[in-house]
Image (spheres, helix red, strand yellow):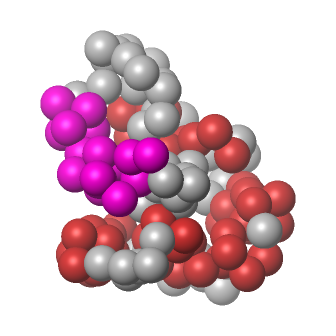
Amino acid sequence: MEERFIAPCGMNCALCYAFIREKNRCAGCLVPSEQKSNHCRNCSIKNCTLHAGADIILCYDCPKFPCLKIKRLDLRYRTKYHMSMIENLESIHLLGMSTFLEKEMSRWTCASCGAIVSVHRETCPHCNQLVNFETENR
């Protein structure tokens, strides 16, 4: 878990299945790479015109936060993946990046094998243990 893997939208790329997998591994949202999917390379949030030429690194710095794009992404991730981009960004803003990353490490570590689990899967990519998204840490 590192600050450089936090996307402008609040996604922790270290939790993305494309980042965790061994083959054709993605390098993260902010790293230029041909290995990223077209979806990630062409992300309308990362490529938002309000980010260009501004001091906005994370979307919480934007005067339009939370914009419709972030709200839609947040709804999809809360519904499908048990995580909120808006909560991530608010946590970073209020607690600081270090505390956020510590909480992420605790929240997304497999209780069985200690590996980082993917937000996009219901099982640990290393030991196939079912991930409990209903625990206090999640």
Residue at image point 68% right, 75% down: 93
Query: Foreground: 31 or 20?
Result: 31
Q: Where 72 sits versus 11, above or below?
A: below
Residue at image point 75% right, 61% down: 97
Predominant SS of the magenta segment: loop
Residue at image point 36% right, 33% down: 18
Taking 32 as reference, is 49 left or right?
Answer: left
Q: Where 20 sits versus 66, above or below?
A: above
Residue 25, image x, y percentages:
41, 21
Query: What residue span does the magenta drawing correspond to?
Result: 38-53
> In the rendered structure, does residue 76 fall within the stretch colored magenta?
no
Q: Where 25 sits versus 37, above or below?
A: above
> In the rendered structure, does residue 39 fall within the stretch colored magenta?
yes
Residue 42, image x, y percentages:
20, 38
Residue 17, image x, y percentages:
39, 40
Quadrant of the image occupied by residue 67: bottom left
Number of marks in picture: 0
- Image quadrant holding the N terminus, namely top right
Residue at image point 73% right, 81% down: 94
Taking 42 as reference, is 6 left or right?
Answer: right
Q: Is residue 42 visible?
A: yes
Q: Looking at this view, name the residue that lies furthest to the front.
A: 53
Q: Is residue 123 visible?
A: no
Query: Foreground: 60 or 56?
Result: 56
- Image quadrant holding the C terminus, namely bottom right
Quadrant of the image occupied by residue 75: bottom left
Query: Foreground: 29 or 126?
Result: 29
Residue 136, image x, y percentages:
66, 85
